Amino acid sequence: QVQLVESGGGLVQAGGSLRLSCAASGRTFSSYAMGWFRQAPGKEREFVAAINRNGDSTRYADSVKGRFTISRDNAKNTVSLQMNSLKPEDTAVYYCAAAPPGLWVGITLSTRYTWWGQGTQVTVSS
């Protein structure tokens, strides 16, 4: 069982930055690929970024590539999402998620993830 708790959301002006963090419980955090997803009102949940268990491979949605950076600290059981050059269309609830041990193929699909956090709101004003 993995419990995930996000933090760091808030209100920011367009062009600004935010850093989201996700704290994970459990001793086997380094076994899981981790991902960030987001869901805007009236829209489906969409993939944002993912990082493999070692932290040496990442994936990004085209919409955030070059602006967002995902990272992890396995010693602290945390995964972060640094968001720069934010746009109003980045407004959404952001979710942290963990995939089963060893999984990486298809990591951009929400169905590949087993554990989810409660989400944190990010609002970007124009």
Image: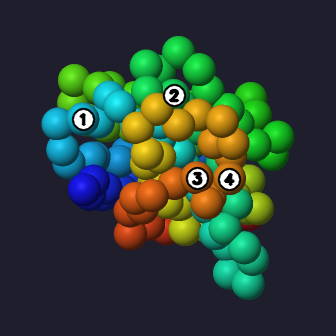
CA distance separating discs 1 and 4: 22 Å
Residue pictured at 28% horizontal, 46% vertical = 23
Tag shown at residue 52: 2
Q: Identify which amino acid the numbered label 4 is placed on.
A: Leu
Is disc 3 in contact with disc 1, using a CB cutoff of under 8 Å? no
8 or 53, which lies in front?
Answer: 53
Residue pictured at 81% horizontal, 46% vertical = 63
Is disc 4 in contact with disc 3, using a CB cutoff of under 8 Å? yes
On screen, 95 above or below 56?
Answer: below
Looking at marks 3 and 1 on the same chain, the residue that comes earlier in the sequence is marked by: 1
Residue pictured at 51% horizontal, 28% vertical = 52
Tag shown at residue 109: 4
Q: Identify which amino acid the numbered label 2 is placed on.
A: Asn
Is disc 3 in contact with disc 2, using a CB cutoff of under 8 Å? no
Which secondary structure lies at badge 1?
loop
Residue holding disc 3 = 112
Which secondary structure lies at badge 4?
loop
